[in-house]
Amino acid sequence: MKINPSQLVTIIEEKVSKIHTTHLDVSFNEILDMYQSNELNISPDFQRLFRWSNGKQSRFIESLILEMPVPPIYVIELDDGKYELIDGLQRISSYLHLRGELVGATHNNIEDKDKLKLSDCDVIEELNGFTFDELPTSYQIRLKRSFIRMEVIRKESNKLIRYHMFKRLNTGGEGLEDQELRNCTIRILNESFPNFLNDVVENQDFQDTTFNISDAKTINAYKQELILRFLAFKNFRENYTHDIADFLDEYMERVSLPSSDMHFIEFDYNNEKTIFSKTFKILNKTLGSKVFGQASKNFDSIHENFSIYQYESISLALQKIINFVDCENSDHLAKISEKLVSIKLNKEFKPITTGGGKNTKNKLNERIDFVSSRLMEIDFD
């Protein structure tokens, strides 16, 4: 039921009262000093999102030399008074790279402490080929003294508000993948869940059954997203409608909220790790690298590839029988293997696990039910 306008005003003002901000004009030399003394923190997950090419970095430096205005950066004030960068990564990292102080950038083939050599400058082409140390002293000083507005979200601000601010500021920038952003933003609320994903992604059975995912996707945190999909659909599927990204965002947020929050969902880390490990041990011991592969065109063999729809349907359907399965019982494993092969070679299964338009709730349930109903036919006695 829609609330009346006066109630809406009260709610909005209450939210606004939880946001405390200030701003500073700081030089890039001050930013470098803050970074070197650990007064300005860039979390490792966030630093890995540095994407600018050398050319784009160079054109930003060129803008500073030309004294062009630059957008502000945003930081969160931590309890100890230090700052954590939440927006402005590309610009700050470009300056740190120029000065030979950048560490932790994994996507740009930049060695730690490497120094940027300017390239692709298009206003002052003569800058190309120069490093910071080779520039005239007057321009080194100009770069050091260049100012940027720093918007500060004070430590008194509500943590959930800070989280949503980070999320909104960073959505859609520099071709980032959804899971990369989730891994960074959620840490403002709670580090436990992203740490859990980073832990279980190293599970050898999971790695073996998903080894054929491209390196590019692996680098972009795709495997962590696969684990999140498994957990979210296993524990929260009734809340799924159609938008997978929003659904995964919501689940990760709700398990990371304070337990006192009305939207909090309990997540038993030890139990979930046990279930995850057993699930992928069974799958690895049965069909291994083919467990998420599709049937061949003639339905006489199974490809060693990876299908997201088969991943979802098989890993989730297995939960119906997982408590009856002994991972060390060869008879149990043989029965599951035989059943999975028959499911994959069933001509009715391929159409519901291939093609577009399969992300609706009904289609998801259809493919999971297709597998689970057949797995439940197995007699483990």
Image (cartoon, rainbow, N blue to C red):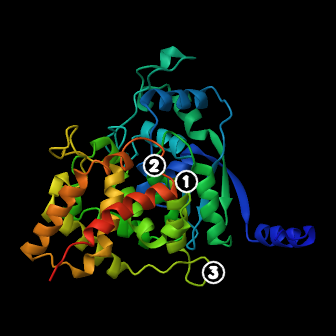
Q: For residue 337, which quarter of the picture? A: bottom left
Q: Which mark is residue 262?
A: 3
Residue under the point 57% across and 69% down: 78
* Helix, strand or loop at mark 3: loop
Identified by mark 3, the residue type is Met
Exactly how many numbered labels are in the figure? 3
365 or 25: nearer the eye? 365
Q: Is disc 1 placed on a helix, strand or loop? A: loop
Residue, x 41% and y 61% (percent of image)?
A: 229
Q: Residue at x 64, y 58 (%)?
A: 165
Mark 1 and mark 3: Cα distance apart in space: 23 Å
* 215 or 43: nearer the viewer: 215
Q: Which residue is mark 2?
A: 358
Q: Is residue 18 above or below residue 242?
A: below
> Which comes sooner in the sequence, label 2 or label 1?
1
In primary-sequence order, the first of circles 2 and 3 is 3
Residue that label 1 marks: 243
Q: Which amino acid does the dot numbered 2 rest on?
A: Lys
The percent position of residue 185, horizontal first and vertical second, equals 52, 60
